Image (cartoon, rainbow, N blue to C red):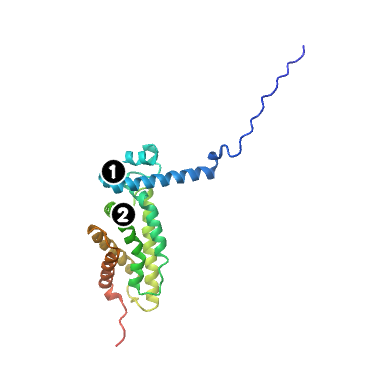
Amino acid sequence: MTAEIRAKPATKRRASGAGDETKPGKREENKQRKLARIAKAAKQVLSKKGFEAATMQEIAKLAGVATGTLFLYADNKRDMAYLASADDFGRALEEAGSVPMDATFIDQIVGCWRPYFVMHNANPEMAKIILSEFLFFAGKQARRHGEGVAGMKAEALRRALWCQQRGELVSTVPAAEIADLSYYLFQGIVRRWVQTGAIDVNEGLAMFHRALSLGLSGLKVQPAR
């Protein structure tokens, strides 16, 4: 008996580009795009409705994702607020590092924190959430924010050390304490400024400058008589 010969089905050639979404690079790209949509939606919802009234469901709907997807990126609504402002804080930190170091310590510190005043001025409602809710760095995005705060403190420390080396600030007080003091003064002043509406950046910077001048008055090297 003649064996029946069956033709093998033709193998379909995968079209160029098909299945690219399974490649690691493409998956990461899609993940980052989704993250950007979620962050944008979170900022819009939080800015419009405030922290208490905003819901994760509204953020998910605006971002075009399932509510459960949000928890892959943020632990809770507070953590989502960190995510909503992460890029703004990242840009502000980058700008702070570019402030020239030939000015006085106070002028340097005011220059370093200026981008944060500009950021809060651009979105006062988000500023209120940031300054009232960002107290502890617990959560996926909160930890990232905490790293940014550490970065700003490190920048202030670098400048305090430089100003001590050139004889502007006394060396009897650790530079780390001077840097911490400048950070605490910023936190107090920026809250007071935002409470008044965060309307004028220059006014906020002037308030900060006065507070630094007063707080650091005893740390400046006095000229010999």
Residue 40 point in image, percent of width and height = 38, 47
- Residue 220 in view of the camera: yes
Mark 2 to mark 1 CA distance (whole Å): 16 Å
Where is 165 relative to 63, above or below?
below
Foreground mark, 2 or 1, reads 2
| Mark 2 element type | loop
Residue 27 point in image, percent of width and height = 50, 42
In this view of the protein, which residue sits in the foreground, 48 or 86? 48
Q: Where is mark 2, residue-wise? A: 123
Q: Residue at x 31, y 84 (%)?
A: 223
Q: Residue at x 39, y 64 (%)?
A: 96
Q: Where is mark 1, residue-wise? A: 54
Where is 98 relative to 220, above or below?
above
In this view of the protein, which residue sits in the foreground, 126 or 220? 126
Going from the N terminus, do you reach mark 2 or mark 1 first? 1
Where is 210 relative to 6, above or below?
below
Q: Residues within 10 Å of mark 2 (few under 14, many from 20)?
A: few
Question: The C terminus is located in which quarter?
Answer: bottom left
